[in-house]
Every structure is written in C-alpha cells, then in structure tokens.
Image: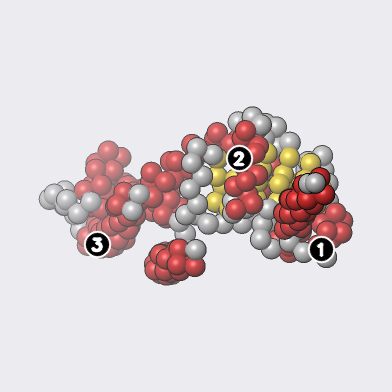
Amino acid sequence: MKGVLRRRQSRRGPRSHSESRRRLFSGGLEPVDRLVVGVAVLTVVLAVGTTGYVLLGLGALDALYQTVITVSTVGYSDPAGTGARYQVFTIALILLGTGTSLYTIGVVIEMLFEGRLDDHIRRRRMQRSIDSLSGHAVICGYGQVGRAIAEAMIDAGTDVVLIDRDSDVDPGDLHLVSGDATHDSTLRYAGVESASSLVVALDSDAANLYVALSARALCPELFIVARANSPDALPKLHQAGADRVINPHQIGGAHMAAAALRQHAAEGSESTSMP
C-alpha cells in the first residue's frame, strides 16, 4: 500500500508542477477561457481594422477583406493610391493582429494536443446530466468510506453525484464534480439544491464541518449525514447542521469487537455443553 501511495505521489508531482507552470504563463486561466479571450480580442482587432480602412477611404467589404488578409499575413498587393497614413495603420494592424492570431491558434493547438477540448466537452455534457437530476444523493469525498457509501446507495437505486478534489479519480459511470466541496460553487455544480441528501465523508473534521455548514445555508431542507473522525467533532457537526453524524472508525471497531465476543461466547457454550 505504501508503495502504491508513493507511486501515485510521484506521478502527481510532475503533473502538478507542469500545471503550475502553465498557470504561471497563462495568468491562471484555463485553456477554454484563454480561447474565449483570444477570439474576443481577435474579433475586436478585425472590427477596428475594418473601421480604420473604411475611414481611410475603402468600402466596407474591401475594408474587411483588407483587414483579414493583413491579420492573416496573406498580404496581397495594396490598393492604388495609398498614402503614409494607410501604411502606418497597416503596420500597426499587422503587429497587433498577427500576435493575436498566433495566440489564438496556439491555444487551439494546445487544447487539441492535450485533450483539453475533449475534457471540456465531457465536463459540459456531465454537468448537463447533473443539472437534470432531482432527488439524488451528493457524496463529498470518494475515498474508501466514500466508495462504500456510493456502492450502497447505487445498490438501493439512488442516483449519486460525487465531489472530490483529486482530478485523477476514476468514477466509472458515476457523475463526478472535480473541486473543493468546501466551496459553495462546487456544491451547486453537484446539484445540492435539488438533492435529497448530502453525505460528507472527507478525511478532515474541519472540512466536514465547513461543508455541512455551507450546505445547510444553501438548502435548509437538505438531509445531511456527516462523517466524524474524532469524538470531539460529533457535537460540532450537529451544531453545524448535520442531521446524522457517524464515526466509521468507532462503528467498525464495535462490529469487530462484537464479532470477536460472539466467537468467544460460542466457544464457551460449546465447552460447557461437553460431558
């Protein structure tokens, strides 16, 4: 188990470092957001270029045509009778428009080669599916406890939406929202306002407390079951709005002790019944 954890950590290390480098050079924006920015700026450049050429004496269609071939660096011959103002404007448009075009094309290539576009489409499709759910269960944390909870709820015929910070989690056919469950926006993405129940099964009592408090504020009628990792967290989670608070370690230990005691009782009864 320790070896598996070390391998997972070693795989996450380079990926998180590369992601931090990408965020450093991209200003923290996701590729889809940068694509939107690039297209918006390119549209502005085309509008400004077309307007500028119209003011310099070209017709509307000729101005748009001249702007497109200038920005795309195709650059056919200039119209006859162009003066210094036309040339200065064209130079400025080439410098601004070419940079914007290369930036937008670079973002598109990045998305295609890194699979970001497919991932974005998949997440949008999953989000639409989550938005259509009602009366489902939201499970925060897809660790060992969360997996057991999800399996039990699926066996009972309940739709499940998972929330987990680890983007490498493989939910199979289940709905997964990758994000921090302590954020209200993440809970809303999981459809907590239309859910029938919320199960908070994170490893941190502080995080469970915060999620329970946030979920109760978002949806006062929501039934909340929270995991307590220590006895001190039980009353605090109740105060935060959890309807049921369960310590899985305590319950598991009680079941194991009961199994051992039943075995000893069975052995004792057999020994007393022997002649």
The residue to which callout 2 is attached is: 151
The residue to which callout 1 is attached is: 231
| Tag nearer the camera, 3 or 1 | 1
- In the displayed structure image, the side of residue 105 where residue 80 appears, left or right: left
Q: Earlier in the sequence, mark 2 or mark 3?
A: 3
Residue 167 visible here:
yes
Q: Amino acid at mark 2?
A: Glu
Q: Position of residue 172 (x, y in %)?
A: 48, 41
Q: Position of residue 199 (x, y in %)?
A: 71, 47
Q: Position of residue 23 (x, y in %)?
A: 44, 65
Q: Earlier in the sequence, mark 1 or mark 2?
A: 2
Q: Secondary structure at mark 3?
A: helix
Give the CA separation, mark 3 to mark 1: 71 Å
Q: Amino acid at mark 3?
A: Ile
Q: 251 and 184: which one is in front?
A: 251
Q: 231 and 81: which one is in front?
A: 231
Q: CB of mark 3 within 8 Å of CB of mark 1?
A: no
- Quarter residue 30 falls in: bottom left
| Tag nearer the camera, 2 or 3 | 2
Residue 37 visible here:
no
Give the CA separation, mark 2 to mark 3: 64 Å
Give the CA separation, mark 1 to mark 2: 26 Å
Q: 246 and 43: which one is in front?
A: 246
Q: Secondary structure at mark 2?
A: helix
Label of residue 91 in the image:
3
